[in-house]
Amino acid sequence: MPNKLIQSPLGKARGLGSAHHGAMHNLAHDITTLVNIPLVAWVIYSIVSLRSASYSEVIAWMSHPVSIVAAILFVMVALKHFALELQVVFEDYISCKCLRMIKVVGMKLFFIALGVTTIISILKIAFTSGI
Amino acid sequence: MSEAPKIHERPLSPHLQVYRLPYNAIMSISGRMVGIGLCLSLIALLCWFVAIVWNPSLFDQTKMFLDNPLTKYVALLWAFFVFFYIGNGIRHVLWNIGVGLNQKAGIISGNIVLLLSAVLTIGLWCVTCDETANPTTQTAVSTSIEETMVQEEFINAE
């Protein structure tokens, strides 16, 4: 690290600008929004049609190949979308850099764990109900 | 140099506590708050799903709660927020490709989103309103766990 006292103004400002990662973040946020539209429509349709179903009816519905694919895609895309969304919220409202880092990384690790657990559960239904 | 201490007398810039938010700002902040709420509800939904997959007896226990008539209205409110959030998301996508980027267009598209969300929610309400008319179906399907296991074995055998 060079001595700050003898650094030129340009030298001080260098490296403090944009990280050039924002565009990809925003694009991924938008794409997950659009991809989620049919998946959310499927989720709402499923909830409406299963609103008074028994456990075995829910399992039978969930073990259909279309449901397995749609459910796994929904979990992945929705969690990715909310991870991007929450990251922006944390970055906007948490000024302490250390706390912000802990929250963003912790949130992402939690989402990965939740996503993996949910997908394993979907696969459990898929492989134990005999498709 | 004598001007320097006056820095404390400068007016505050308008911030959230003292500033009456215009329509587009209200839509923006409510979109973000709805997003956080939906994120929490998604976490809860996935936890419930994982729980009932690994412990099927939890399904019948939560069924009592889900069969509560109030739950339907909570679910409809949730659906309204989902529609609102997706509509807001589409607005953001359009803004990012340069469509409707001014105050008037923002107000119009915001109203369209609110109206469509309300229409879709009322549509869902109409689709599900047979529930209250025929409450016997709810008790008929709430089988005990033993029966569920038998049905599961039956499905496996098929």
Image: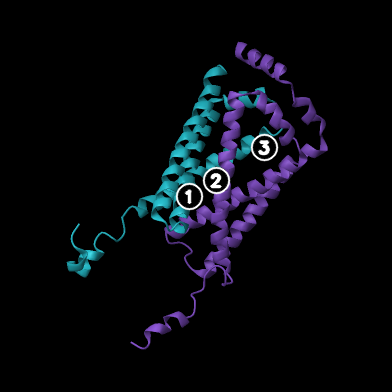
Chain colours: A cyan, B purple
Dot 2: chain letter: B
Q: CA distance from mark 3 to mark 2?
A: 20 Å
Q: CA distance from mark 2 to mark 1?
A: 9 Å
In the rendered view, tell whether residue A74 sits above or below residue B61: below
State yes or no: discs 3 and 2 in contact (Cβ < 8 Å): no
First along the sequence among labels 3 and 1: 3
In the rendered view, tell whether residue A117 sits above or below residue B104: above
| Residue at point 23%, 65% (across, down) | A12
Residue with the mark numbered 2: B39
Residue with the mark numbered 3: A48
| Residue at point 55%, 60% (across, down) | B29
Marks 3, 2 in one chain: no
Q: CA distance from mark 3 to mark 1?
A: 28 Å
Q: Residues within 10 Å of mark 1 (few under 14, many from 20)?
A: many
The disc labelled 1 sits on which kind of residue? Leu
Tell me where residue B153 sits by quadrant. top right
Quadrant in the picture for the C terminus of chain B: top right
Tell me the SS state at disc 1: helix
Q: Position of residue B113 (x, y in %)?
A: 59, 57
Residue with the mark numbered 1: A86
Q: Position of residue B145 (x, y in %)?
A: 70, 20
Marks 2, 1 in one chain: no
State yes or no: discs 2 and 1 in contact (Cβ < 8 Å): yes
| Residue at point 24%, 62% (across, down) | A14
